[in-house]
Image (cartoon, helix red, strand yellow):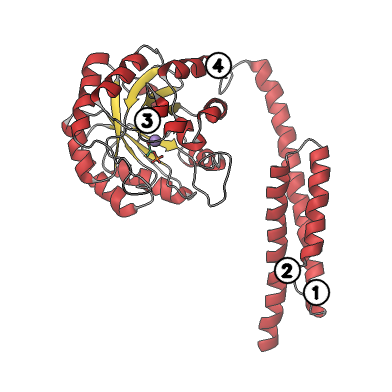
Amino acid sequence: MESELKTSLIEEWRGYKGRPFLISGPCSAETEEQVMETALQLAQLKEVSVFRAGIWKPRTRPNTFEGVGIGGLKWLRRVKQETGLLVGTEVANEKHVYEALKYGIDMLWIGARTSVNPFTVQEISDALNGVDVMVLVKNPINPEIELWIGAIERIARAGITRLGAIHRGFSSYEKTTYRNQPNWQLPIELRRRIPNLPIICDPSHIAGSRAFLHEISQKAMDLNFDGLMIESHIDPDKALSDAAQQLTPNELKELLSRLIMRNPSTSDPRLLDVLGELRQQIDVFDDHLLDLMEQRMKVAETIGNYKKENNITILQSTRWDEIMKKVITRGVAKGLSPELIDTIFKAIHQESINHQMKIMNNGIRKETE
Ligand code: PEP
Ligand code: MN
């Protein structure tokens, strides 16, 4: 289902200073001094458009810092008055929306733990009806594109046009290098489904650690994301939440200076010609890949028939182990990453199993007919 949202282009948003549209500030507002000092330093960076600070914090465990609450909204209002930066915070229910709007907050975002819940998103949408404020919807913690799009659509229905998405990665059970898995194909699919919707990357919550902020930011820029949300704190190590993933404003400045910005498209006719030809080659290879997979499945089906006739189980794990080892070694020798080979071949294997299952089950149905 294609979405038809009436959203405005990010270039037309108040406060837009160019790509990346930059949102920065501490994970949490902690004290008036911490908020003001961080904001004053961030205001010195020409790229920052919006100052962020969490007022209500969704924490995994109780008895951890859950935000300063309404009192902190006054500090954000002060930031706006004294630095000229726009200000934004997370809202997780209708009360948060009313309170934030009362203090003139310019941008509201819906957190990953809220966008999973259609009831709550609807409640927030109802509270936003007819209000003109920027709203960003973080991806739900689980990698479900429809849930993300659904939350965006609910907010759009309230008449919000300065609407965008934040990609903050997805939670996974396995221990991984990053705190949250980026699953880049999801924001890419979101762009395909809603082409004009601004997408902001949140490297802080993907990384979970300062060390990876630059590489994730660069990747987001290379994928043509519109903006970045990066947490910044005057004294990151002493932050009451997300200490490991925040940068000082100075470190943020340094990160930005190292970002390489590439153009999303070109109008140079010669380059367009060359690209056109190369893209045709890619299309030919893609067709070829599909043909090969079709042929591979036919062979798998033939094997399925033999297995059925001889009463052999579909899955033979030793054979599968050998295949995986072989293709990874050969793939790596061809300059392909082991992750790619692993993903592709597991998917192909699953597809073979599905084809063989169909053959087996058809047989069973026939026998009972
Ligand atoms: C945050 O932005 O500080 C936050 C809580 O983010 P998320 O909803 O992505 O976990
Ligand atoms: Mn945070």
Ligand 2 within 8 Å of disc 4? The answer is no
The residue shown at (76%, 51%) is 291
Which label was assigned to residue 356?
A: 2
Residue toward you, 316 or 123: 316
Name above or below for residue 181 compared with residue 76.
Answer: below
Amino acid carrying label 1: it is Lys
Q: Quadrant of residue 350?
A: bottom right
Amino acid carrying label 3: it is Ala
Question: How far separated are the C-alphas under marks 4 and 3?
Answer: 25 Å
Which secondary structure lies at badge 1? helix
Which label was assigned to residue 258?
A: 4
Q: Which residue was labeled with disc 1?
A: 307
The residue shown at (46%, 32%) is 244
Amino acid carrying label 4: it is Arg
Q: Residues within 10 Å of mark 3 (few under 14, many from 20)?
A: many
Name above or below for residue 77 compared with residue 287.
Answer: above
Q: Quadrant of residue 162?
A: top left
Tag 4 near tag 1, CB within 8 Å: no
Question: How far separated are the C-alphas under marks 2 and 4?
Answer: 51 Å
The residue shown at (28%, 38%) is 67
Q: Earlier in the sequence, mark 4 or mark 1?
A: 4
